Amino acid sequence: MSREQEVVEACPAELFIAGKWRAAEGGKTLAVEDPSTGTTLCEVADASPADGLAALDAAVEAQADWAATPPRERGEILRRTYELMTERADDLALLMTLEMGKPVAESKAEIAYASEFFRWFAEEAVRIDGGYQIAPNGKGRFLVMRQPVGPCLLITPWNFPAAMGARKIGPAVAAGCTMVIKPAAQTPLSMLKLAELMTEAGLPPGVLNVITTSDSGGVMEPLIRDGRSRKLSFTGSTPVGQKLIEQSAEQVLRTSMELGGNAPFLVFEDADLDQAVAGAMLAKMRNGGEACTAANRIYVHSSVMDEFATRLTERMSALTVGRGTEDGVDLGPLIDAKQRDKVKELVEDAVDRGARVLTGGTVADGNGYFYPPTVLADVPKTARLQKEEIFGPVAPLTAFDTEDEAVAMANDTEFGLVSYLFTKDVNRALRVSERLESGMVGLNQGIVSNPAAPFGGVKHSGLGREGGSVGIDEYLEIKYIAVAQD
């Protein structure tokens, strides 16, 4: 048996409810595909709405005892989870690569990133504070405390199978909330393995329940509309997020929404081009471009456009495409045929409207869902990829002449997750950063994600923040107690 087979077979394949692994109702299963070959990797349980309700039952039953668990104990469980993930990073990374496609080196980086959320929130668990205040008229006292919001519903995407779950589970555990989490059907294995590790770390039964399903809407909607759920956190597309917000309104759920992005990447005439090209490679090619933070629209001052385009094209052309488990591979496949076809359509649309292909731009024959690193020049404003999230290894370049023009183009979108800005001028850096309509700005760097920083966007990119010192606030309610005093 190969190591790949060993890693897959060692991963749980059933639902995790009330601390036990169990089959889905009727024994139904769904196939997990290897995107590098298009073949079935394994089968996992395919939950029904009844299975989802059973998971919520378990979370509700465990909530009171878990909320009463000392913060230090909750933090120690998170710390042990961090340590287990670090110890087993190689196997966890290989499992992720097999189900998602990215090179093993990138998967290891994600495991390190995901584990840091557990270490960060292990430390936040013991820092949940409150307040004491004398009433303004002196005739009473105010006590303010923060308590867990209650059973949470967590829905995560396929592009970062471990990190997106860790970013939600970490603060929920630290705050004293129980959870039902539904990973994406394309990449359920990393979350199933994480549940196993957290159980080994001492997480009590019912605190974390994992349901895998091919019918996300049918399984999750009843839980959202169930009055016992008190919080919904979702990472995914804006249209799905909008639908979930509508559903959550019925029970007035607390919601956190990390939705779509359309990140602008601005390179001004005074930018350090070495730094800007390196930043563009990070911002564009992290996770193969399948990231909500990916640079979707690259705007370069006309005076440096030719040089920037040449350097970026050289870097992109030099990337090696292949199966993520192979040595020397820089770029793996896209997640599935649907995503590859979308990228192909967006590139063809841009070319039809006048864009020039500097490298890539065509799908190679063979198995798997591969798309080559692609650079497009002279991309017009009318191209679909100027408005739609690409989610692939395509870098569209558009020139600008003035700062106002660059900012206007950057803000000309319904999204507002992250923006990137490269300049040596401190005044411009601050001025433009303040003008950009996004929740985050990468200033002279191509990556913003950090467990110690608040992650989130504005406009159609979402609600709330994950990570940082404010990340735990999404899982806590404030209670005020008015104390009479003679």
Image (tube, grey):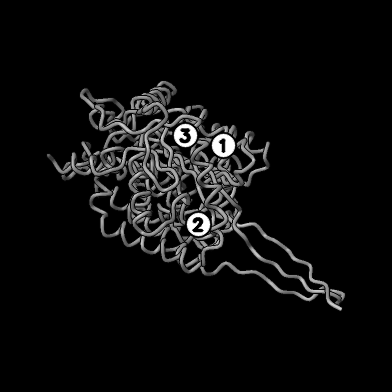
Q: Indicate the amino acid at tag 3.
A: Asp
Task: Provide the secondary structure element on which disc 1 rests.
Answer: helix
Camera-near label (1 vs 2) is 1
Query: Which residue is most to the left?
Result: 1
Q: Is residue 45 above or below residue 133?
A: above
> x%, y% of residue 333?
28, 34
User: What amino acid is labelled 1 in the image?
Assistant: Leu
Q: Which mark is residue 223?
A: 1
10 Å neighbourhood of mark 2: few (<14), some, or many (≥20)? many
For the residues labelled 1 and 3, say whether their Cβ atoms are less than 8 Å apart: no
Quadrant location of the C terminus? bottom right
Image quarter where the N terminus lies is top left
Disc on res. 51: 3
Q: CA distance from mark 1 to mark 3?
A: 11 Å
Sequence order check, earlier mark of 2 and 3: 3
Mark 1 Cα-neighbour bin, 10 Å: few <14, some 14–19, many ≥20? many
Q: Is residue 114 left or right of residue 434?
A: left
Q: Is residue 18 above or below residue 70?
A: above
Tell me which numbered mark, 1 or 2, is placed earlier along the sequence: 2
State the image coordinates of residue 113 (x, y, percent, origin top left).
37, 55
